Amino acid sequence: MNEVFKDVQSNDGKIKNYIEGQLYNRIVNAFEPVIFLIKVVSYPIASVVALCGSLFIMVGSQERGFSLISRAGIGYKVVQMIPLFMRLLRLFSPT
């Protein structure tokens, strides 16, 4: 019998299939390589976007350039915080 699924008899006599937090943790752990890849790629992408923003500033479109640079910085910081969000999900997972 799989350790994730437990057959428990309820009060009304029907057998229900309960899933513990182990399945939830397995799903979260399955996304860790994808999250690592996104974190690794985020720095070069944010650098290219910030470079494009500085080029816009040099051309004369300061508003668009500063907008690109600030969005690149905010996006990079949010992507770097994804593991924190995943840990919070694991902390508040149903057990």
Image (tube, rainbow, N blue to C red):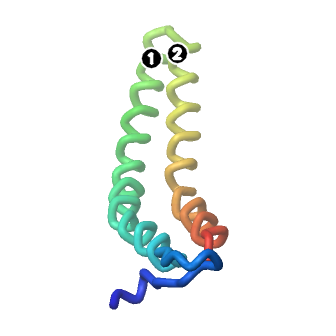
Please name the residue shown 46% across and 33% down the image: 50
Which quarter of the rendering shows the C terminus? bottom right
Asked whether the viewer can see residue 19, the reply is no
Q: Is residue 56 above or below residue 3?
A: above
The front one of 66 and 87 is: 87
Please name the residue shown 55% across and 83% down the image: 9
Number of dots carrying numbers: 2
- Quadrant of res 56: top left
- Quadrant of res 39: bottom left
On residue 64, the disc is 2
- Contact, CB < 8 Å: mark 2 with mark 1? yes
Farthest residue in the top direction? 60
Dot 2 amino acid type: Arg
Residue 15 x/y as whole percent: 49, 78
Residue 32 x/y as whole percent: 39, 67
The front one of 47 and 21 is: 21
Please name the residue shown 51% across and 46% down the image: 76
* Residue that badge 1 annotates: 56
Residue 71 x/y as whole percent: 55, 32
- SS at badge 2: helix
Query: Badge 2: how crowded within 10 Å, few (<14), some, or many (20+)?
Result: some
The front one of 3 and 58 is: 3
- SS at badge 1: helix
On residue 79, the disc is none
Dot 1 amino acid type: Phe
Farthest residue in the front direction? 13
Q: Is residue 6 above or below residue 23?
A: below
Which dot, 2 or 1, sits closer to the camera?
2
Q: CA distance from mark 2 to mark 1?
A: 7 Å
